[in-house]
Amino acid sequence: MSLVNIENIHKYYGDNHVLKGVDLTIAAGEVVSIIGRSGSGKSTLLRCINGLESYSEGNIILDQMEVSTDDFQVRKLSKSVGMVFQNFNLFPHLTVGQNIELAPKLVRKTSAQDAEATSKEVLEKVGLGDKYNSYPSELSGGQQQRVAIARSLAMKPKVLLCDEITSALDPELVGDVLKVLEQLASEGMTLVLVTHEMNFARDVGDRVVFMHQGKVWETGDAKEVFANPKTPELQSFINAVL
Amino acid sequence: MYQFTDWDILRNLLLAARWTVVLSLIAFVGGSIVGLILTFIQTSGNKVAQRLIRIYVELFQGTPLLMQLFLVFFGLSLFGFDVSEWTAASFALILFSSAFLFEIWRGCIESIPKGQWEASRCLGLSYYEIMRHIILPQALRVSIPPTVGFSVQIVKGTALASIIGFVELTKAGTMLNNATFEPFKVFGMVALIYFLLCYPLSVASRKLENKLNVAR
């Protein structure tokens, strides 16, 4: 049984037809990289998977739950799917620890003690065990992004969606964040990444999905797709970015 | 004829200034309560309520405070309500300040980046939880300087209540002037007292702005 099942979804922004019938199945433990030019619909697709964006046709099933933008449904989904953003979106008025513990306490009704234990554990995992009491503004971009990952992990999701999470980082900080992702992948976490890090997509990813004009244009095994792109669009895209 | 000494003038003005302070406090506290209620209704997303609030706000922002005072004072008595100067002044000033405080606070809430909503939603927080734990604490921080700044406007706005016969600082000044024929001295003192009331608020507003601008 696949963890995420996307069937023929369509999405419009006004008259703009952004997703034109996307089908995609993601199995548990898979690392899927979504690549493509800007405007190809890859971020929109990702945001549809956890109910952040609505879609007008088709359907998405995640962990046997229907995905919709309904508040109740989004809250239910949040226990199965986490999301990390390009701009971190940490809560600036809360410490790192509070950032991580808020949702488990409110949504999962975890006790303060357990939440703190989990929070320290996930911080350790992203290599920031000593930042528990810091405020986000005291951290570098790379550290903030790792806290954002830790915050998602504390909800114990089955899938982690990453929306260009290294794009806002200074080049020398990208490595630390990718290392965390690589570790998660090796532990069997299901990852869906919209990314511009082609090397990462090729070396760590299991599968690559190339989006073009609102459709899944080409998809396949990561190494294979990069070595032998079939469509001219993917060929020219790979030539442009590599 | 009784001769007013400078001390007499000042003493009477200071006594009247009490009512300026009390009226300001009523306007500020009352306006805050009404403004808060409006803010909550606004953010709850009911379209009809939002439109009504917009009309309310435009009405009070688009007409002079003096007209609002007149309408409450004379208008309500037309309908058979006998309103005292106290009631009329308090009522008009509360409505007036609620409209402005609402605008300030709405702006503060909207100034919180959309990403904060999205991240909270992805973590499964409900609308109420997002407001309570994420948006309001941040909006509150942003809102303190402009709110304190607006309180200066309220203090000065109370001067208009003198026109409907409410004896506060300005009205007392007018009366003392009629008795002493020393407008420069009397109104100089009146202005000075207003300044002493407002200046600390302006300074506080600026200090808070500097302090709170440093994002944590």
Image (cartoon, coloured by chain):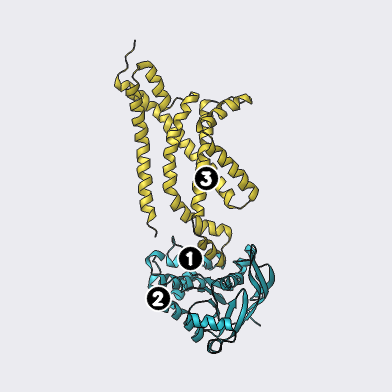
Chain colours: A cyan, B yellow
Q: Amino acid at mark 3?
A: Phe
Q: Measure how far apart labels 2 and 1 are at the Cα level.
A: 20 Å
User: Within 10 angstroms of label 1, few (less than 14), some, or many (20 or more) residues?
Assistant: many
Q: Position of residue B86 (x, y in %)?
A: 51, 28
Q: Residue furthest left?
A: B6
Residues indicated by labels 3 and 2 sit on the same polypeptide chain: no
Q: Which mark is residue B102?
A: 3
Q: CA distance from mark 3 to mark 2?
A: 44 Å
**Residue that appears at 53% across and 39% down:** B61
Dot 3, how many residues are within 10 Å of its Cα: few (below 14), some (14-19), or many (20+)?
Answer: many
Residue B123: name its quadrant.
Answer: bottom right
* Residue labelled with disc 1: A89
Q: Amino acid at mark 2?
A: Pro
Kind of residue sitting beneath label 1: Asn
Residue occupying image coordinates x 48% and y 36%: B26
- Secondary structure state at the residue bearing disc 3: helix
Q: CA distance from mark 1 to mark 3?
A: 27 Å
Label number found at residue A22:
none
Of residues B63 and B50, the one nearer the viewer is B63
Mark on residue A171?
A: 2
Q: Position of residue B48 (x, y in %)?
A: 65, 47
Instruction: Please provide percent x and percent y for residue A83.
Output: 54, 71
Q: Nearer the viewer, residue A95 or A28?
A: A28
Asked whether the residues under marks 2 and 1 belong to the same chain, the reply is yes
**Residue at image location 38% in from the left, 50% down from the top:** B209
